Amino acid sequence: MEYQYPFDIDWTTEEVIDVIAFFESIEQAYEKSIDRDVLMKKYKRFKEIVPGKADEKRICDEFQQSSGYSSYHVIKKMKDQPESGRISL
């Protein structure tokens, strides 16, 4: 798909790469499936970079507007599934 990933100009190059990796995992959950543990690891790293709820919501909303993929629904499904497995929507 052709769209831009949201990012903050104050992030380091490594942080931008990690946030993009998180959003790529959201895409993977929609397009195929993703291992819950892999997604959890990427989400935890995303939360280290974007610790605030308001910022998380803003960035995820930007991604959803651009891509059509809801990070919220993927993360909710991940949290609702307590055991290892695959996440797909």
Image: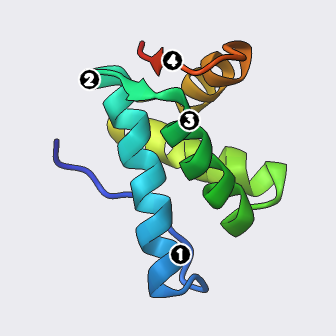
Q: Which mark is nearer the camera, 3 or 2?
A: 3
Q: Residues within 10 Å of mark 1 (few under 14, many from 20)?
A: some
Image location (x, y in percent) of residue 66: 37, 43
Q: CA distance from mark 1 to mark 4?
A: 27 Å
First in sequence: mark 1 or mark 3? Answer: 1
Q: Which mark is nearer the camera, 1 or 3?
A: 3
First in sequence: mark 3 or mark 4? Answer: 3
Residue found 42% across the figure and 12% down from its top: 89
First in sequence: mark 3 or mark 2? Answer: 2
Residue, disc 4: 85
Q: Element type at marker 2?
A: helix
Q: Element type at marker 4?
A: loop
Residue type at tag 3? Asp
Q: Residues within 10 Å of mark 2 (few under 14, many from 20)?
A: few
Residue type at tag 2? Glu
First in sequence: mark 4 or mark 2? Answer: 2
First in sequence: mark 1 or mark 4? Answer: 1
Q: CA distance from mark 3 to mark 2?
A: 18 Å
**Does 41 sit left or right of 24 as displayed?**
right
Q: How is the image coloured?
A: rainbow
Q: Element type at marker 3?
A: helix
Q: Which mark is residue 31?
A: 2
Image location (x, y in percent) of residue 3: 25, 51
Q: Which mark is residue 37?
A: 3
**Does 61 sit left or right of 56 as displayed?**
left
Residue, disc 1: 15
Image location (x, y in percent) of residue 5: 38, 57
Q: CA distance from mark 1 to mark 2?
A: 24 Å
Q: Which mark is nearer the camera, 4 or 2?
A: 4
Q: Residues within 10 Å of mark 4 (few under 14, many from 20)?
A: some
